[in-house]
Each structure stands twice: as C-alpha cells, then as structure tokens.
Amino acid sequence: MSQLTEQLHHSEIGDILENSLAGNKPGLDDCKRLLDSEDVHLMGLVAGYLTRKKFGKRSSFVNNMILNYTNVCITDCKFCAFYRPPGHEESYTVTLDKIESRVKAAWEMFGITQVMFQGGHNPSLRIEYFEDAFRLIRKKFPKVGVHGLSASEVDMISKVEHTSTKEVLSRLKDSGMQSIPGAGAEILVDSVKQIISPKKISSNTWLRIMEEAHNLGIPASATMMYGHVETRDDVAEHFMKIAKLQEKTNGFMAFIPWSFEPNNTLMQKQDTVKYPAGGTQLLKMIAISRIMYNDLISHIQSSWLTNGVAMAQMALQYGADDFGGTLLGEEVVSCTGARSTELTGSRIIQAVKQIGYEVEERDNFYNVVRTY
C-alpha cells in the first residue's frame, strides 16, 4: 500500500481514489474526472485492491447457455446485426420442442445451471409463448435457472398484450423467470438512444421496468454499452442513474460494461463507428465500474464476449470479480463476426487459474455451486 499511496499523492485523481479506498461513494463530478483521466493503471491498482479485499483472488462464472428464441424484431437498432424484420426469409422463432431439446443437450453435455433467454422484439409472440417456455425449462430441468427477458422485451410483450409491464413481469415470474439481464440499457441517455435505437424504450422506461422487477423480487443485472456515439457526460449520467436506482431497490446483482462491436452493423456501414473501443478502454471501464459501485453493486463482470479471454484475465485484476458465463448457442454478437462466441467452463477455469486465481462456479443468483 505504501507504493500505492505515493502514486495517489502524485495523481490528478488521487483524491477520488483515496476517498474510494476510505469507503466514500464517488459522485457525478468524480465520475467525469475518472473518465477524463488517462491514469488507467492507477485506477486498476485501486479497483483491483478493492476487489481483492472483498473477494480475495477468486473469480466466479456461471455455466450458461444463451437461447436466442427469435431474431424477428421491429426496433431496427443501428448497433444490431442479429435482427431480421417480420417475414424475412432468414427470420426464425424457436419452437417449444426445440427449446426443450437445446436445453436438454446443454444440460447433458455441459451441466448448465442457467439459460439466458433473449431475442428480438417480435410482435407475433404472445405472453403464453414465454410462460410455456419458462414452465417447460423449470419443470424439465429444475436445477437450471431462467435469466431473461430484458426490460425492452418485457415492454414489447406488454404492448402486444395491452397490459402493464408490471403485470407481464408478475406473470413471467410466476411461470419461472427468476432474474433479468440488463440488455436494452445501452446508454441511459435519450439523446444517445435517439441515434442508435430510436424505436426502443426510453431511459426512464428501462429504469421503471427494472424498479418494478426489483419490487416484485426479481433481481437483475445492469449493463452499459460504450464505444459508439456517447460522450463522457453521457457515460457519467448512465453510471449515476444506475447508482440512484440501486440505492433505492438494491435489486442489481451485477454490472457489466461491454464495448460496442460495430462489424456488420448499420452504424459501421454509415461510418458512424468504424472500430471497437479496444482493450485499454475496457480496463478503464471495468476499473471505474468497481470504484463507482464497490459498496452498491457487488459483482462486476469481465465482459469477455466482445473483448476476448485474454482481456477478461486482465479485467479480473482491474476490478472485475466475475468472468461471466459460458456461452453455448449465442447468436447476437456472433452475427457481427466478433471473436468466437463459444466458450466452455473448462476454458474459463483454465483462464482464471492461469492468473493464479481460484475459481467458483455460481448460479444465476451468484450463489456458489462448486469450486475448482
């Protein structure tokens, strides 16, 4: 700590980092200063120290499959290469029989403990489709948790059913949905959303649906997609909006900052974004996430999916405590031509042990189910 203290005294963000080490929550201006700073290494030292103090030299992961149940979508997000409009020759919706067979195969071959159930905004799907799917998974595979749907998908279902999002959440919970992923947040600033996803739910709607879920006893993840058209102030506002809701509900289990992957998207074709943000920016966002949320949101994920396993190993030393999930059957990011989006538990275990960390496998509630 003596060497760290010396570095803090000579850094323009030293006061923020010292306050964080003392247990004080950073505010909006502090967040902006961190985002402006290029002292990523020092942020990482502090964030890594805070993480090891809380978790030791350990990393968790979840044995997970992603089930992208439909690629039919009417929101036309400019950052997405996955969706197809209704009636397109490449559009699909997975039947209940295929849902069962896919989960069965992943359970038997890999021993999954979670299904992440996400897809497009398909106006043809009634709520009964989701209820039947969740009941099937929970009945046939009781040791497999259901993590899905996103707030924006919940909003879509409410529009199809002409009912409230709270009613949709209640019915989905009763049918077996146990937790909610943070997708659909992107950047919680409407001026950004108007550029990248103008047909999707507003920032306030995302926050309201998340609050409704928390109040119904449905925990969630929170996410941020950075590296597109957002400004420093937009990112800081996003951090603070998540913090404000968490202080109110304590419903977020984890925060996941992930970089936009532009390949094959409309934003790349329009020259809005040409290249991904890169590894240094990932480490900076991971470190700031830990510093901003250390006493608010326990778990920070490594965001390996868009940055690769090697960067995830670095992220674990810069403030992340959770590697994320194995991915079997993922189709959204893979449509961008990004790195391999298949990753098994054995590869994660190997990657974590390579940096001298212990490995814990968890469920979708972050309860440890086994150690390696």
Image: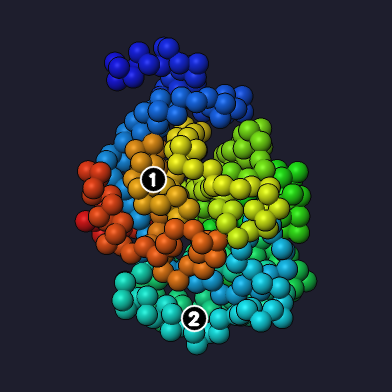
Question: Closest to the observer: 29 or 220?
Answer: 29
Q: Position of residue 370 (x, y in %)?
A: 26, 59
At mark 2, the secondary structure is: helix
The circle drawn on residue 99 is: 2
Residue at image position (34%, 38%) is: 317
Q: Is residue 221 left or right of residue 369?
A: right
Which residue position holds label 1?
311
Give the quadrant of the C terminus: bottom left
Q: Earlier in the sequence, mark 2 or mark 1?
A: 2
The residue type indicated by label 1 comes to Met
200 on left or right of 299: right
Identify the image quadrant of the N terminus: top left
Residue 351 visible in the displayed image: yes
Type of amino acid at the residue the image marks with label 2: Ile
Say which mark, if any, is on residue 326.
none
Front residue of 212 and 43: 43
Question: Residue 281 placed where, x, y %?
Answer: 50, 38
Q: Is residue 103 above or below residue 298?
A: below
Which residue: 31% across, 72% down?
110
Which color mode does the image show? Answer: rainbow
